[in-house]
Image (spheres, coloured by chain):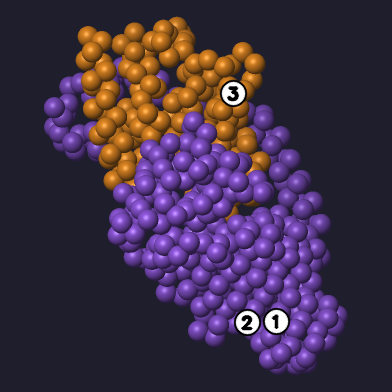
Amino acid sequence: MSDESYWWDRTGRPDAELQTWERELAPFRYAKRTSKPRWQYAVAAAAVLLMLATVWMMRRTDTMVVVVRMEGDLTIAGRPGRAGTVVPQGQRLETQAGGRALLRLGTLGEVELVDEVALVVAPAKAGRITLRLAKGELRARIAADPYAFRVETPGAVVDDMGCAYQVVTDPAGNGWLRVSEGWVRLQSNGIESLVVEGTEAALRTQTGPGVPYRKDIDPALRRVAEAITDGQTPDGLALSEALRQAQRADAPTLLNLLWRAPEPHAELIFKALAAQHPPPSSVRWERFQAGDLTAVAEWWPKLGFRKTVKLPPAFYAN
Amino acid sequence: MEEIHRRYASFVHAILLARLPHAECEDCLQEVFVRAMQGFATLQNSAKLPQWLAAIARNVAAAHFRKPGNRTVPLDGLPENAGLPATREGWKILDEIRKLPEAYRETMILRFVEGLTGPEIAERTGLTHGSVRVNLSRGIKILRERLEIQK
């Protein structure tokens, strides 16, 4: 039997059988090419450059944030704003208690600011808009490519995936997000939530984005979702009870729990979700166990979500 | 892109070799990097580049099988390409690796075909050291058993 460190990093006592495998399999190894890349690379590179130039030209004027209408006072960098005012990058926009304002986001969509709001139009890549929401309620309706519109809150970064949603942040930086159409991605410090229509998630400065759930979710499942959101591990009995109460419509919650729960729990969650929404044969527990999130992309169309849209790169690509 | 190709070609090759006949891997590998170049602007987080390339490679492999005439992989131990200087023993070992559970297959090829160490596999795939260690440990155990049975 081999010394484990040999097959791990070749530092230990060699194992004759493993050395045989290495020798016999060596002919299949990728043979490094010294020639220049094939002509397809040059064509592809030229096409990409042309496309990027075209997109850049088209989008230069597409990301202007403009006040369309307002009720009550609105200030930009401390000066009064009015309908038609452009909100410059880096300037703080504020509405007063009881006020409302509608902002047009270039050709990406629009946001309505409700009550007492403070935000800044933050720097963003060409063709994109990022709003930094310090406090207040923002209702977004976006018709743009995924990731074109982003809201940064103290609790999480909200990436739009083509949808309508409501996000609220209190002065301490905590809040919540509710999606009414499509879905959004939340992320903070490596923690990620996918929030689909009909569900809502907490935004917390200490623990990041919450596990999303339906408003009328069973209390047992809600307690488990909140425990995971808080970084706690629910006990096995509580999880079993919660999974018994889970309905088909709770697939978004189970899916988020699946990649956030510790392993023994995650396997139970996988089984519960698979019982309600049988996955394709290629999607097996071992893939999640190995951290292969591309399995989510394969399962996604069968989970009952209305839209099939592009998942973040960690889940899928191309 | 040349630097990315230099750094990740063997990694992408392993993912393809886990799924495709050896003779098809070179062309598919080129296709993966052409697609990567075309889609590079959509990559949100450059830290996820290896996982992104891996996903493209899996897509290219899947697309390969959707083409008429490409629906089967020779997994019966018969040589796919007599032009390679591989022995019958080598084909047999590769064949058995391809029959391993999916979670172990890529890791085993990265280790024993492409010659990466466990830490290098973790770095390329984005898996934790623990997951790579489990995949290798279990993959080696199963492979030993299956090859032993054939002796």
Image mark for residue A145:
none
Give the orange chain's letter: B
Numbered disc 3: what chain?
Answer: B
Residue B121: x %, y % from top left: 36, 40
Give the purple chain's letter: A
Residue B91 lies, with reference to residue A272, above or below; the image says above
Image mark for residue B64:
3
Numbered disc 2: what chain?
Answer: A
- Seen from the viewer's position, the closer of residues B136 and A172 is A172
Using the rendered view, name the quadrant where residue A37 is placed: top right
Q: Earlier in the sequence, mark 2 or mark 1?
A: 1
Residue position marked by numbered label 2 in the rendering: A136
Give the residue type that dot 2 points to.
Answer: Gly
For the residues beneath circles 1 and 3, the answer to whether they share a chain is: no
Give the residue type that dot 3 points to.
Answer: His
Q: Residues within 10 Å of mark 3 (few under 14, many from 20)?
A: some
Residue position marked by numbered label 1 in the rendering: A114
Mark 1 residue element: strand
The C terminus of chain A lies in quadrant: top right
Question: CA gap, disc 1 to disc 3?
Answer: 52 Å
Residue A246 lies, with reference to residue A26, above or below; the image says below
Are dots 1 and 3 in contact, CB under 8 Å?
Answer: no
- Seen from the viewer's position, the closer of residues A299 and A129 is A299
